[in-house]
Image (spheres, rainbow, N blue to C red):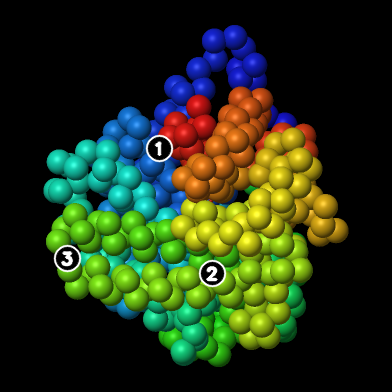
Amino acid sequence: STDDTSLKKPGYDLDKRAIQILRENSWGDYTLPTKGLYPYQWNWDSMFVALGFSEIDLDRAWTEVESLFQGQWKNGMAAHIVFRRDSPSYFPGPKVWGGTHDVPTSGCSQPPVAATIVRDLYEKNPEIGKQRLPELFPRLMRWHRWFHTMRVISGGSAIAVTHPWESGRDNSPDWDDALADVDPTGVTPYQRKDLGHVDAAMRPTNAEYDRYIKLVEYGRDCGWDHTQITREGPFAVADPGITFILMRADRDLQALAKYLDKESAVHEIDTWLYRDQIAASYLWNDEINAYSARNLRTGQHADGVSSVGFLSYYGGITKPKRDAKLQKTLSRILDAAPYSVPSFDPQHPKFDSRRYWRGPTWAIVNYLIARGLEEYGFEEKATRIRLDTRKVIQESGFFEYFDPMTGEGSGGNHFTWTAAIWLAWAS
Ligand code: 2M8
């Protein structure tokens, strides 16, 4: 399915092509995930892009992060989409979200990889870091504080995602059970735009979209009161992705606080890190020998293994008894998919090798999983994941995601985060 026919020619330079993709999708101080399908700035996409840029242009990398925070809310949230200019090629655009901010944004957030990436940028060149960090640091603190207050249900530690889009893994089977409880009746009629860009078999279903939009309407109708949405809204699920990514980012934010001698921030983050441990334990599922999502309204666990469940190492949590089981589960899944890591267990009935977050392999998730595994000494698996990522990009190009069985590229092409991960890690 690749339209990058030159990919197969000898001497084709993937590094050059990756840099070109970053530059082509860059719109001044921010970068689009891919033209057409995603014509705005997405939160975690931008952070991976910053990592990619840091290989060739560190100044541009810092700018990417700073531009995301131009859309930060007064309550601290860094939104999942920043809408700089209206584009008819994406739905739902700024009007549907109904925001009243100076810089229009969506009303939910996305996995907070930012502090980790900012630490990487800082450590790459502390001289530049010392100039750029002071302004960004309080913004990162406010965003993390938002997660630890407005995305927890009183007295608890688990971090809720209140919209599948907040998790970044839109149609993962992890949300099926909670999403079935969202009543789509009365949703305002709308027209999907994604299906004009990619094959419907690679995207979420209409039934899922009705619920996604219904959840946006609920948030908008309550004036984006995030405390209310978390406590009483129609959807609240604890996600291993957000939980482990936040946990890691809290640690990295603490390291940044130390660089800046911000003692009270260091102490505040200590309390977050303590609760992160409890949040992680809440997700351990002995029935499937993995961490799995949990519906916060019912306590019910998702019954399948998602690749983000292996981010516990990246998050910095190891428990010998659990890990022995988790490693077995990971070995089984790596053995089942020649182009690992599949976003969902290939041996589970809900696995779908082409449908978005229900099976396909994603370079960004591979990078995060391998980074954690490597830090905890699981070199062999980390290398396997890196080589699989390299191979799939070499064979298919810079697609949004890949079929874990055949390696075929799916979704959008010339995709920025895949190019960024190539430059920063996979090549
Ligand atoms: C996908 O999500 C957007 C909604 O946010 C969509 O499908 O319309 C996800 O893969 C998400 O993780 C990603 O950030 C976004 C842009 O690449 O696309």
Q: Is residue 80 above or below residue 407?
A: below
Mark linked to residue 52: 1
Of the residues tagged 1 and 3, which is closer to the observer?
3
Within 10 angstroms of label 3, few (less than 14), some, or many (20 or more) residues? few
Q: What residue is drawn where x is 26% and y is 43%?
A: 123
Q: In x, y percent, where is residue 207?
A: 75, 69
The front one of 265 and 233 is 265
Q: Quadrant of residue 52?
A: top left
Residue 7 vs residue 344: left or right?
A: left
As measured in the structure, the alpha-carbon distance from the residue carrying label 2 to the one carrying label 1 is 29 Å
Q: In x, y percent, where is residue 58?
A: 27, 37
Please say whether residue 122 is visible from this viewpoint.
yes
Kind of residue at badge 3 = Lys
As measured in the structure, the alpha-carbon distance from the residue carrying label 3 to the one carrying label 2 is 27 Å
Q: What residue is drawn where x is 25% and y is 56%?
A: 256
As measured in the structure, the alpha-carbon distance from the residue carrying label 1 to the one carrying label 3 is 29 Å
Asked whether the beta carbons under mark 1 and mark 3 sit within 8 Å of each other, the answer is no
Q: In this view, does 412 lie above or below 347?
A: above
Mark linked to residue 176: none
Of the residues tagged 2 and 1, which is closer to the observer?
2
Q: How many labels does the image show?
A: 3
Read off the residue under disc 2: 280
Within 10 angstroms of label 1, few (less than 14), some, or many (20 or more) residues? many
Kind of residue at badge 2 = Ala
Question: Is disc 1 placed on a helix, strand or loop?
Answer: helix
Q: Quadrant of residue 84?
A: bottom left
Residue 420 vs residue 65: left or right?
A: right
